Image (tube, rainbow, N blue to C red):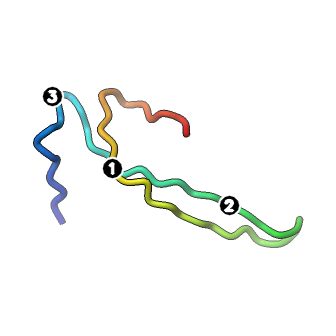
């Protein structure tokens, strides 16, 4: 699968897919349940992601 970058990226920017993962459990000792949320694409100018 090829994922083409949009034309509006500046030189040096990268396109990344941003996901948020939440772990929850009802009580201590029970296993965690994992929930993944797709937050879409983001253009990065540096190698660091902002903390959300």
Q: Is residue 5 above or below residue 12?
A: below
- Label 2 belongs to which residue? 23
Q: Quadrant of the C terminus?
A: top right
- Near-viewer residue (29 or 38): 38
Disc number at residue 9?
none
| First-in-chain label (1 vs 2) | 2
Disc number at residue 41?
1
| First-in-chain label (2 vs 3) | 3
Which picture quadrant has residue 24?
A: bottom right
Q: Nearer the viewer, mark 1 or mark 2?
A: 1
Q: Residues within 10 Å of mark 2 (few under 14, many from 20)?
A: few
Which picture quadrant has residue 27?
A: bottom right
Q: How far across and how far down the image is residue 33, in percent?
A: 68, 70
What whole-number distance in Å separates the C-alpha atoms at marks 1 and 2?
22 Å
| First-in-chain label (1 vs 3) | 3
Which residue is at 59% across, 66% downward?
35
Q: How far across and how far down the image is residue 6, in percent?
A: 15, 46
Q: How far across and how far down the image is residue 42, in percent?
A: 34, 43
What SS does tag 1 mark? strand
Which residue is at 53% across, 54% downward?
20
Which residue is at 16% across, 60% downward?
2
Asked whether, in this view, residue 51 is left or right of residue 1, the answer is right
What whole-number distance in Å separates the C-alpha atoms at marks 2 and 3?
37 Å
- Label 3 belongs to which residue? 11
Q: Nearer the viewer, mark 1 or mark 3?
A: 1
Q: Residues within 10 Å of mark 3 (few under 14, many from 20)?
A: few
């Amino acid at each position: 699968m090829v994922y083409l970058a949009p034309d509006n990226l500046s030189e040096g920017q990268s396109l990344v897919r941003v996901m948020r993962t939440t772990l929850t459990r009802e009580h201590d000792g029970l296993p965690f349940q994992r929930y993944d949320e797709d937050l879409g694409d983001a253009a990065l100018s540096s190698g660091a992601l902002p903390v959300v």
